[in-house]
Image: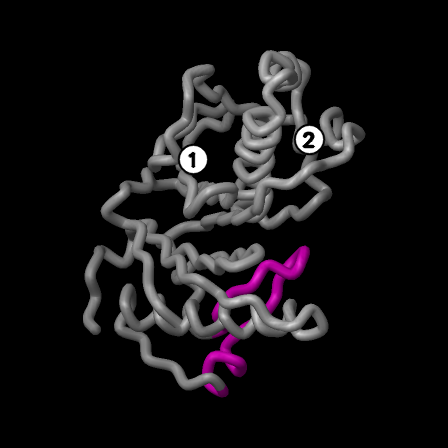
């Protein structure tokens, strides 16, 4: 397949992940994530690993963030939601989150959003669909930062913030301004009601997001 980018670049591979019976749903998504990881390692780094070799390479650090034992300079992060799986790669720590827009308990607002973000969200209160979408735009951005950092839920989500434009979001890839210096955030809709956010030390461009098949 060959190396299509500078290995230091941030790229994202996304693929549809067919639904499995509920009892095997998580395992199916987990296997799809590993398959996408192997594909990305070959595409980005010309590193061809069998399933067993990949299993032998995987180690888990603090808060279970995965890494490759013999390739510490390869950073990656996997995420999945109903119907989709994604894997981001970079030459520095990277975080990826995929979520399906759905109802959420109001108790999450103060746990996830700053006061300014909550005030921004309130303007969409009368438009249920936009309200939910806007919340998940914030949520996936915050999750991508937590996964990039590797701190897990020990990191205070209200300790950093994002500025989402009030205009209509088309779902196209956009860069998002944040309070986090030295980091870049990008966001897009993979399909209706499925939001992807990525956090990296390098800007993420539309040309660096690849839709592939498993």
Residue holding disc 2: 112
Between residue 204 and residue 56, name the one nearer to us: 204
For label 2, count other residues whose C-alpha is less than 10 Å away and answer few (under 14), some (14-19) or many (20+).
many
Spot occupied by residue 72 in the image (x, y as percentages of width and height)? 44, 64
Q: Which residues are magenta?
A: 52-69
Colour style of the rendered protein structure? one colour
Task: Provide residue 33's location: percent of width, then percent of height.
Answer: 50, 67
On whether residue 121 falls in the magenta region, the answer is no
Q: Secondary structure at mark 2?
A: helix
Q: Residues within 10 Å of mark 1 (few under 14, many from 20)?
A: many
Residue 65 screen position, x and y as percent: 59, 59
Depth order, front residue of 134/67? 134
Q: Quadrant of the N terminus?
A: bottom left
- Residue pictured at 35% horizontal, 68% vertical: 213
Would residue 64 be counted in the magenta stretch?
Answer: yes
Percent coordinates x, y for residue 57 in the rendering = 50, 77
Find disc 1 in the rendering and name its residue. 185
Of the numbered discs in the image, which one, if any, rests on residue 73? none
Looking at the rendering, in which quadrant would you find the C terminus? bottom left
Cα gap from disc 2 to disc 1, whole angstroms: 17 Å
In what element is the residue under mark 1? Answer: strand
Query: What residue sits 41% from the left and 85% below the top?
Result: 50
Q: Residue at x 65, y 61 (%)?
A: 64
Mark closest to the chain's N terminus, 2 or 1:
2
Left or right: 154, with 128 as reference point: right
Q: Are marks 2 and 1 in contact (CB under 8 Å)?
A: no
Q: Nearer the viewer, residue 171 or 41?
A: 171
Task: Kindly identify the residue that appears in the image at 69 percent across and 33 percent down.
Answer: 156
Rendered position, 168 above or below 49: above
């Amino acid at each position: 397949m060959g190396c299509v980018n500078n290995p230091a670049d941030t790229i994202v591979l996304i693929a549809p992940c067919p639904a499995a019976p509920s009892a095997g749903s998580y395992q199916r998504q987990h296997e799809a994530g590993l398959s996408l990881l192997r594909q990305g390692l070959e595409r980005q780094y010309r590193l061809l690993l069998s399933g067993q070799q990949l299993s032998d390479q995987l180690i888990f650090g603090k808060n279970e963030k995965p890494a490759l034992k013999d390739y510490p300079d390869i950073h990656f992060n996997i995420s999945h939601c109903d119907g989709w799986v994604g894997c981001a790669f970079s030459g520095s720590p990277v975080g990826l989150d995929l979520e399906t827009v759905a109802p959420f308990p109001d108790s999450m607002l103060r746990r996830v959003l700053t006061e300014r973000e909550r005030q921004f969200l309130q303007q969409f209160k009368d438009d249920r669909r936009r309200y939910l979408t806007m919340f998940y735009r914030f949520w996936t951005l915050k999750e991508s930062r937590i996964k990039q950092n590797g701190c897990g839920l020990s990191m205070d989500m209200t300790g950093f913030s994002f500025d989402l434009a009030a205009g209509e979001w088309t779902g196209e890839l956009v860069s998002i301004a944040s309070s986090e210096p030295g980091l870049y955030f990008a966001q897009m809709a993979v399909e209706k009601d499925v939001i992807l956010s990525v956090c990296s030390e390098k800007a993420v461009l539309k040309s660096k997001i690849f839709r592939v098949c498993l």
